[in-house]
Image (spheres, rainbow, N blue to C red):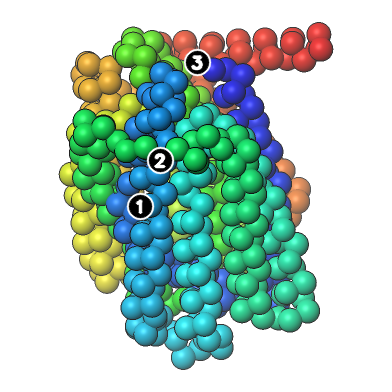
Amino acid sequence: MDKKRSVLNVGVSVFSKILLLVAALYVRRLLIQQIGNDVNGLNSLYASILGMLAVAELGIGGAIAFSMYKPIVDGDRRTVAALFGLFRKVYRVIGAIIFVGGLVVMPFLPLLISDYGTIHDNVYLTFFLTLVSVCISYLYSAKTSLIEAHKDNYITTGILTIGQLLRYALQIPAILVFHSYTVFLICQILETLVIWALTEYVVRKRFGDILQMRETLAPRILGEIKKNIRAMCMHKIGTILVSTIDSLIISGFIGVVVLGLYSNYSLLAGIVASIIALFFSPLTSIMGHLCAEGNPERTEHYFDRFYTLNFILGLVFFLGYYAVADSVISLCFGGGQQISRTIVFVITLNQFTMYMRKTALLFRDASGTFYHDRWKPVAEGIANLVLSLLFVQIFPEDLRVVGVIAATILTTLFICDIVEPFVVFRHVFQKSPRGYYVRNYGYTLLFGLCLCLMTFLGHSFDNDLLGILANGLLSVGISVAAMALLAVLDRKFRAGLKTWLGQGVKWVRKRRKG
């Protein structure tokens, strides 16, 4: 495995995410205070609608990106050029389809907002601006994938960071001077144009020969891509149903203002998830190269180590999130933005269960075994939709949001956590996943018990800075106790913990010598 490239990709990603996190929280605070929480809810609703329209992408990007790994390893630049050419053409068509789909949805926006009469902004104009920003991104998506397929994620992360920092720098005066959601969204379009220009420059400089080649794919490779696309299409549909349906149901049945409050906590939880996911996401292409070598035992070794690290990070970060979420929301977005602790509890549990899928998904994507679990996302999406619609109506009025989130947790635990590991173990490691199931459900139960313990002990502290520190330290203490218990009971966890502690010690010693 290319360790230097891995460290570079992860390091740049983590630094970028922390920098953007601070800027994003400050801009959202200004947006809520200066324009209103209803606009915050509209942001979440628009993202969900466009996420539904993104089904037009059909998972094509993942299928073609995976197909690039082997020719890159083999040095076959003609095949890479042919794949890139196909990628570019397909993404332009997808962008056009999403744009037309957005125009079709636009007249029906009031039906998706239960408290539409209280909204002061022009929802048609603001949705159109958001749509334009998303569609522009499809003009350079193929070039971004070309860079990342060569394991240079740090470059695309740097470009994204520059673009987003520019957007935030423009949005702050847009809010303070113009008090305009419309100008706020125009800044978002400018960001997309800057990212497009920088990506174009990098690709022309590094991969100019690939851009100039006009190659056609061999029938065998094209057949494999079509097979993977059919599988990824189902994955895309299921993912969109799960990731966007919660916001749509909350907006349609409860209201966009409540969606705005919920989205603050979801944003914070999503930021936590994305920060720790940065330790894994840049490794997809590197794991793809490893899987292409065809050594199941070596691949499983990395799987076990990554899964251990995944749990450690998830336990510490998400328990910490639950401990300080109310206080951080109050500090970041002002008073009156909190929701009930029950809702925060299920948000945390949902984010943790979703996050614990990362290792299995990383190795599934890297190995290209999309086809074998193609029906899983469809079942997941339908189950989540049916349960969400049922729970939002039968749960008490003050707990309807809990019902919507609980539906997602159930589908994750009893569909995703069964099928996804089965595919990886059976088709990549060529063995039964039975031991993994015991380990994964045991870890999830342990995290739930830690949440309950945190709920019981954390009420004794106030929501000020001292309370944040106290609750944060308490969550760390509970996390360490849970890891100590696992180190005694679980041999694989003990081995993984020893590996990562050893890597940490080596890194510190190397820094000191340097």
Q: Quadrant of residue 446?
A: top left
Closer-to-camera residue (321/97): 97
Closer-to-camera residue (145/108): 145
Disc 3: which residue: 1
**Are the residues at dot 2 and dot 1 in contact (C-beta closer than 8 Å)?**
no
The percent coordinates of residue 33 (x first, y second) are 69, 74
Disc 2: which residue: 214
**Are the residues at dot 2 and dot 3 in contact (C-beta closer than 8 Å)?**
no
Q: CA distance from mark 2 to mark 1?
A: 15 Å
Q: Which tag is nearer the camera, tag 2 or tag 3? A: 2
Task: Report the side of 274 relative to 247 (left or right).
Answer: right
The percent coordinates of residue 297 (x first, y second) are 34, 9
Give the mark nearer the N terminus: 1 vs 3: 3
Give the mark nearer the N terminus: 2 vs 3: 3
Residue type, mark 3 in image = Met
Closer-to-camera residue (14/127): 127
Residue type, mark 1 in image = Val
Secondary structure found at label 1: helix
Closer-to-camera residue (247/371): 371
Residue type, mark 2 in image = Arg
Crowdedness near tag 2: few (<14), some (14–19) or many (≥20) residues, C-alpha within 10 Å = few
Task: Report the side of 163 relative to 119 (left or right).
Answer: right
Residue 354 in sight: no
Task: Report the side of 494 relative to 370 (left or right).
Answer: right
In this rendering, is residue 358 above or below 184?
Answer: above
Residue drawn 61% across the image and 60% down it: 193
